Structures are given as structure tokens and as C-alpha cells.
Amino acid sequence: MKKHNFSAGPCILPQSVMQKAADAVLNFNNSNLSLIEISHRSTDFVEVMETARSLALEHLGLQNKGYQALFLQGGASLQFLMTAYNLLETKAAYLNTGTWSDKAIKEAKLFGEIIEVATSKSENFNFIPKNYQVPKDVDYFHCTSNNTIFGTQMKDFPQTAVPLVCDMSSDIFSRQLDFSKFSLIYAGAQKNMGPAGTTLVVVKEDILGKVSRAIPSMLNYKVQIEKDSMFNTPAVFPVYVSMLTLQWLKDLGGISVIEKENNKKAEILYNEIDRNPLFKGFVANTEDRSTMNATFNLRNEELKATFDDQIKQAGINGINGHRSVGGYRASMYNALPLESVQVLVDVMQATEKGA
Ligand SMILES: *Cc1c(COP(=O)(O)O)cnc(C)c1O
């Protein structure tokens, strides 16, 4: 039986997508060839890439609004430097809400001056800073919508005079936002969209071409746009699976439908974390809690062996917290069924009864 997979990333994908992906590896579109052994320039694959790009824009409500969707390689981590390479002329502002923002800042510093507008680093990133000012004279403002490791999530985004750039790796397609507020969104596929190996970049074309430095072709968004995301051989399998997941989401009814499910799952788990005297949540302010990654701990570490054993017995996978936080992290991405959350809650209650 399939495990209850709470892995933070790579993570659970819909079973129906897995089946279709497996079929395509053996026989793609009844061609008697595998998806991964044909030319990426073949009509069948070009159609996959085009469908994936247009579905991404459609879900975000950004079709015909001057945006382009790209499927690149190098993970979200390459975007830490690629955004700066393409957009940073003199200085940029960053909100530092976790390990990934911190890494983005480190890379951007190679290209110009970085103003950290606010950070929660001194509190081990257990809250989202608010009431900060974004300077008007910066090239862009960068933030991370969901902090996968710490379990915090931005619920509001500042109104900025400068382009808003956001790392949405771990909550893209999970909730409705006014995506047109953002000039550039990037997301590694492996948290809510597909297998590791491709990164979605959604960029408003009018912010490009403004820096004076020469940009290597592979790292140049303009080149990638001109080449329809096929400047070189794309990650064919991850792009195909991402396309299937985006289609699955569309068939379900889109982001607004999955968001309700995600809210239900998060509510069930956080209610239990708050109710059950054995547990405590990691995030300081409940309003900052992530609907995707719930971080919590046992109040009494002596119960760890018992709890871990029951977790295992119940077929639950991937809920150990990141080493920088400890405790537990239950990631509840789009494809995680509500029943899996119920199983986890049952185990928490069973541990309470036995304690
Ligand atoms: C996982 C993650 C990353 C890193 O992604 P890679 O694809 O491994 O480079 C960056 N940002 C966030 C928010 C993440 O969750």
C-alpha cells in the first residue's frame, strides 16, 4: 500500500500522474517509443513544453498579460543568482525569512549591493517580519512566499514601486494570490509540481534587458524566452510530469479548489497540534503558519521513540524536521490526501492516550 508521504521535497505527486508518467516512459503517445528517448524537437515533445508553459500561466491568471513561463534547469538555487544576474544593476532589497532567502541573498551579493529590509534570523526564523519598508531606489524586491524548513508563510505581500520577485518553490499552485503583483516568480518543481530537475520561471517581459552587464546565454531569460524554453535540451521527463500535474490540477478545478483542500488539511493538523498537550508548534505567531509545511515538536522528548514507532507502524513517511529546526515537519502539498493528515492526527492522539 502507498505510504502517507509527508516528505518536504521531492514530495508526493498525484498517483494518476505517476501512472501516466510511467506509461509514457514505456510508450509515449502510442509512438512505441519512450518519452525519454525521442528528440525534444519532435512535434510531440514541443507540444508538451508548450502545454506546460501555457497551463502554468493559465493557473496563475497571467495569460496575455506580458508574462512568459519557462522551464529551466539548475533548481531554484540557480534562480538565486539568475534573478540577480538579469535584474540587479546597482542594489536590490531582500526580505530574509529563512535558509532559502539567506542563500538567495548570498548569491545576489555577487552582483551588487543588497539591502536586507528585515529578518527573523535571530529567532531561528520562527516568524515573518512585518512593517518593513521597501526602498524606492532599488532594482527589485525579493521575498520567499513559503519557508519550507521553518513552516512559515507570507500571507500578505507588500505593495512595491519596484518589481516584486518571489521564490514560490514550496507553495506555488497551492493558493490563490494576485499573481499579477509579481514581476518574476520562480519555483523548483519538486515541491508541488513534478520531479526534481526543472524549475518554473514566470517573468514579466518588460523588466528584462535593463542591466548593463553581459549575460551568458544559458543564464539569460531573454534568450530562454526567444528559444521557447529550449535553448538547450530541456529536462524532458520533469517537464512532462509537471505538465501532467498541471493538467490534474486543472481537471480538479484549479487553484481555488485545491486551496480549500489545503486549508482543510492544515486546519485539521494545526488544531491537533494546539489541542494535544504532548505537542507544541514551532512557529511563534499562528497567523504566519504555513499551510504547506507544519513544524512541531514533542514537549517531552522521552516520548520520541514511542511516537516515531507509531508513525512507522501507520505507514507515515517523511515527517522528520529539518536539522536546523528539529522535531517534526509534516508537508501537506497539493497531492497529499486529507486521509493522510487524519492518519497522522490519529497517531498523535494514540500517543497521547498511551502516555
Ligand atoms: C527547496 C527549496 C529551494 C531549493 O530548491 P532547489 O531546486 O533544490 O535548488 C529554494 N527555495 C525554497 C523555498 C525551497 O523550498
Image (tube, helix red, strand yellow):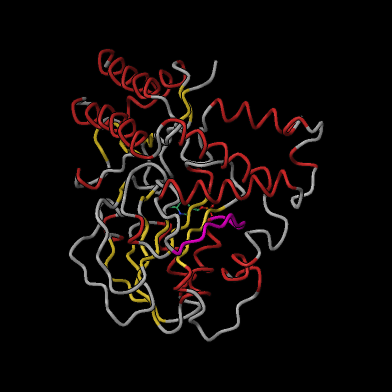
Query: In the displayed structure, would residue 335 be above or below residue 83?
Result: above
Image quadrant where residue 38 sits = top right
Identify the residue at image location x=26%, y=18%.
352
Residue 176 counted in the magenta span? no
Residue 67 counted in the magenta span? yes
Pick whichever, 214 or 347, lies toward us.
214
Q: Quadrant of the C terminus?
A: top left
What percent of the width, then of the height, locates residue 131? 17, 64
Q: Is residue 265 left or right of residue 41?
A: left
Identify the residue at image location x=76%, y=48%.
42
Identify the residue at image location x=31%, y=21%.
345
Query: In the displayed structure, would residue 336 be above or below residue 354?
Result: below
What percent of the width, then of the height, locates residue 279? 25, 30
Q: Given the current orientation, which residue lies at the most extreme front position?
A: 64
Q: Is residue 265 left or right of residue 104?
A: left
Q: Quadrant of the N terminus?
A: top right
Query: In the displayed structure, would residue 320 be above or below residue 225?
Result: above
Pick whichever, 202 or 110, lies toward us.
202
Pick whichever, 58 or 290, lies toward us.
58
What percent of the width, then of the height, locates residue 260? 30, 33
Main SS, magenta residues = strand
> Which segment is the magenta one?
66-75
Figure label count? 0
Image quadrant where residue 151 sits = top left
Identify the residue at image location x=24%, y=26%.
272
